[in-house]
Amino acid sequence: MNPAHPAVLLVEDDASIARFVTLALEGMPLNLVSCASAEQAQSLLQSQPFALLITDLMLPGASGVELIEWLRSSPQAGCSAVVFSAGVRADVALRLEQLQVWGVLRKPVSVAQLVDCVESVLAAQPAGSPAPASVQAAGADVPVDMQVDMQADVPADMPADGGPAAVSSYFGGDAALFHSYRASCLAQLPDDVALGENLLAARDAAALRRLAHNLKSVLRLLGHEQASGLAQTLEQACLASDWAGATDAWRQLGAALLGMLDGAGQRPRRG
């Protein structure tokens, strides 16, 4: 780490999404630190100064909102916060405004949008300095596109396996970056499939919903729109406590994930 560079803390429990952020911000003059829970983030925030917190909302344990609430009452209250989430309800959006978050990045976001957001925040708030008054005043004078959900435009006709379209929409045309990210996701998928089967057997709707929430964004970044839709259906079924619907959605999603692994020659062997 370069001590002259600002520190950015990413709180993301999905390894594939964390990998995407790491790849997107690679080469920027900053020190990126990652963790998977609000509790781990609190420990890190107490151990060193951070210029920016980027956090998901749906986390194991305390939520991203609870983390930001804690942050605002801590010695690092001046640290800017950006929410990185697949969806924000109206009541949550109001609370985030009250907590003076810089903005909300809606998953899946493009590399360019993520980089632009981070660059804007760090330019306005040098590491170790309190947030400017204009930012603290509920986002006054903050660019409009930083105050609302931001999501890459996805072609309406993107096919189920829209690799080339995904490269264009989310990776700025950088095919090498896309394939690096895809390789890391494929390496993670067997664990995701096994986890989904275990959560289904345990009837753990909350954890299965969280897995579906994360897979929804990962699959869209990879251009698998139909599989992403299955993940969204699974998430909604878990939220509605519709176990029959959740079971059916997971069976379809699990088959789609195994199909991706088959296509890449990476399906795990049994026994």
Image (cartoon, rainbow, N blue to C red):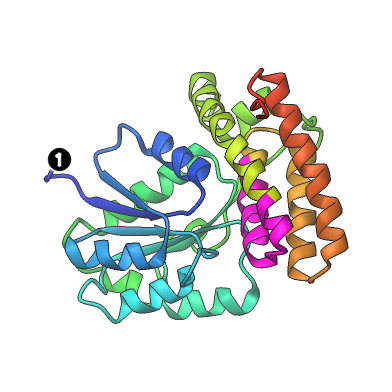
Near-viewer residue (270 or 162):
270
For the N terminus, the image quarter is: top left
* Residue that mark 1 sits on: 2
Between 14 and 172, the one lying in front of the other is 14
Q: Is residue 22 left or right of residue 259?
A: left
Residue 125 screen position, x and y as percent:
25, 59
Q: Is residue 125 left or right of residue 197?
A: left
The residue sitting at 70% across, 49% down in the picture is 197
Is 100 left, or right, of 200 in this rendering? Answer: left
Which quadrant holds the C terminus?
Answer: top right
Inspect the magenta stretch and tell me whether residue 253 lies in it.
no
Start-end of magenta stretch: 198-218
Of residues 153 and 21, which is closer to you in this image?
A: 21
* Residue 100 in the figure: left or right of residue 203: left
Identity of the residue drawn at 58% across and 40% down: 191
Q: Amino acid at mark 1?
A: Asn
